[in-house]
Image: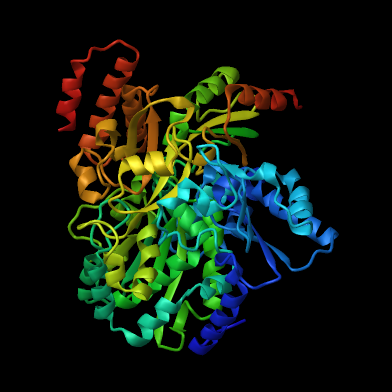
Amino acid sequence: MEEKMNCMDKKVREETKEILKKYPPEKDRLIGILNDVQEKYGYIPKQAQLTISEHLNIPMAEIYGVITFYSRFTLQPKGKYNISICLGTACFVKGSQSLLDRAKERLGIESGEVTPDGKFSIDEVRCVGACGLAPVFMVNEEVYGKATVKQLDEVIDKYQKEN
Amino acid sequence: MGRKSIQEMEEIRSQKRQELELRVNTKADTREKHILVCHGTGCTSSKSPKIIENFRKILEEKKIENVRVIQTGCFGLCAKGPIVIIRPEDTFYAQVKPEDCEEIIQTHIVEGKTVERLLCKDIDGTIVNRLDELNFYKKQKRIALKNCGVIDPENIDEYIAFDGYKALYQVLTTMSQDEVIEEISKSGLRGRGGAGFPTGKKWSFAKQNEADQKYVICNADEGDPGAFMDRSILEGDPHSVLEAMAIAGYSIGATQGYIYVRAEYPIAVQRLKVAIDQARDYGLLGKDILGTGFDFDIDIRLGAGAFVCGEETALLESIEGRRGQPRVKPPYPANKGLFGKPTIINNVETLANVTRIILNGAEWYASIGTEKSKGTKVFALGGNVNNVGLVEVPMGTTLREIVFDIGGGIPNGRKFKAAQTGGPSGGCIPAEHLDTPIDYESLTEIGSMMGSGGLIVMDETKCMVDIARFYLDFTVSESCGKCTPCRIGTKRMLEILERMCERKSRARRFKQIRKISQ
């Protein structure tokens, strides 16, 4: 089977094996492994799932079940700039819904989707823990606190101009 | 480094305690100064790591000695972050920016004057010099948060200096398993995750079950949106949780513990990892702890963003590597829990109280709070309130005291409409109940619940139908899908409320909502 794989798949397989080395082949380690893979790629590639399935001796269907259960795991890559808008209660009360609506309107995508050029994606998150700065949105790891629609517009403008 | 004996622990304690006297005593006799910078999630989001870096760089450039920059956990007043405190004089600077560091060092450290413009203004307009002069702090009582904002959470010696791990060796050398459980029972400590089950009782059930292996689990899957108490404890004082888990392990006869923590809390996870490594290095976790023959170790398990995993049996499923769907109870985890073995699952805040109870005695703890709810409760105060932050108050404090005296009231001169407690499964408390003393029973009586401690204040401009829709939207997307009432019922209710918000539905539909919820 390995011969038929293209080089991207091979690379994912090798890298997943590297991650697996940190873990004993026990089934209860699945979520930890998936967390590492998600962090590395921004999603969980199919080849990674296959590799984990062989390593832990868990059927692919079960792995798929776990991935789709937990909101942190995704099957699609995110955009280069992933805009996460906090919809925790504290942010919601301070108007984060209008931020989410604005982001959707500007980028023409729904939350959980990626723009066709792969540049932006939108995520709804439940509390990033910066309630003191509510409302909050994040672009990748950077946090924007006490955010306004104007500030979100400026951030989107900045990244849209970038090639 | 390496393993420590009880005697060596005592030596570290007395030596370090003297060194750190300036952290708690404004009159400490020392030439040193400590610049404490909050390194919790809230302040980190507003660039506190950069502030720490700048301070260190400037001190080095100016070749100033006897001044140390310390990263601490949350001071509590997140609304004024990033917060910088200089000890021993205890000067409190609010909303500090990285470019303010130069001025603080020059004016405060070198010239010995206060940087007036960075001092904090209280709600009534008075300028305060010290953190504890703020109204925000006056009615608080810090037990679980005692060390948060005082010690460097990544330095085990600082924890030891403030009586860290003393409770553990007191338990291991002078108390039997039953005596520990008895002490916790007598204190009246109840589960801080929300349900309020007596902690001592939970431990005694697990102790009674004979098994070759038992487990202690710390539930740090703080899923309620707007709640960040547990995260702040883990970030500010991780060792107190580890120590309490070891004490719990001793009392029920377990040798392995797990901390199930949200992957969304990277700083907390990092602090826990550091703390576990340090505790292992000192021989406070692992084999033959402090030479007493007791074995106990702790591993971290990460969650992956599922609200339902805060429920204890769903959490067990998740640790075992499966979809986090709750199990049918009974059997309860105390009989048949993780990997089918007797297991106790305690919330972070519950555990943070354990060492204080052992050290100060059950009577002391039971003297705080109300008749049925003892001790204190930490709340994450958020929403339309001036002092957003982390507060710890004795049980029985009224909502009015929390929102108006501690929280400083509602911004922009608006009126209070409701306070939401208990997360998505809790309720909104209207103004008529503002004077209810808060404890487990009283909150249930007025239709809400204690929950884990999120307390969101809403002003008069908020639409309660919209809030109800928001929470239902949350429960629909977080439903694990196992049981029909939740999977289908919440969806139906959401549809009705959505139509209502779009003005396409009549109020009589409320009857239908009531029927579904019953």
Give x and y (percent) for residue B176. Answer: 28, 84
Q: How many marks?
A: 0
- Choose between B419 and B349: the one closer to the eye: B419
The answer, for residue B472, to whether it is visible in the render is yes
Residue shown at 30%/53% (left/top)?
B395
Q: Residue at x 34, y 35 (%)?
A: B419
Q: Position of residue B271 (x, y in %)?
A: 55, 61
Image coordinates of residue B474 in percent, x first then y, are 36, 34
Query: Colour scheme in the image?
Result: rainbow
Decide if residue A40 is on the left or right side of residue B214: right
Residue B345, placed above or below residue B43: below
Whether residue B335 is visible, yes or no, is: no
> Which residue is depicted at the point 36% across and 49% down?
B309
Q: Quadrant of the C terminus of chain A?
A: top right
Classify residue B260 as left or right of residue A33: left
Q: Depth check: B52 or B368 in front?
A: B368
Residue B195: image location, x then y, percent: 25, 52
Q: On the image, which quarter does residue A5 sit in?
A: top right
- State which quadrant residue B460 falls in: top left
Residue found at the very far front of the displayed protein? B126
Query: Up-down: is B75 above or below B188?
Result: above
Towards the viewer: A77 or B355: B355
B310 lies left or right of A103: left
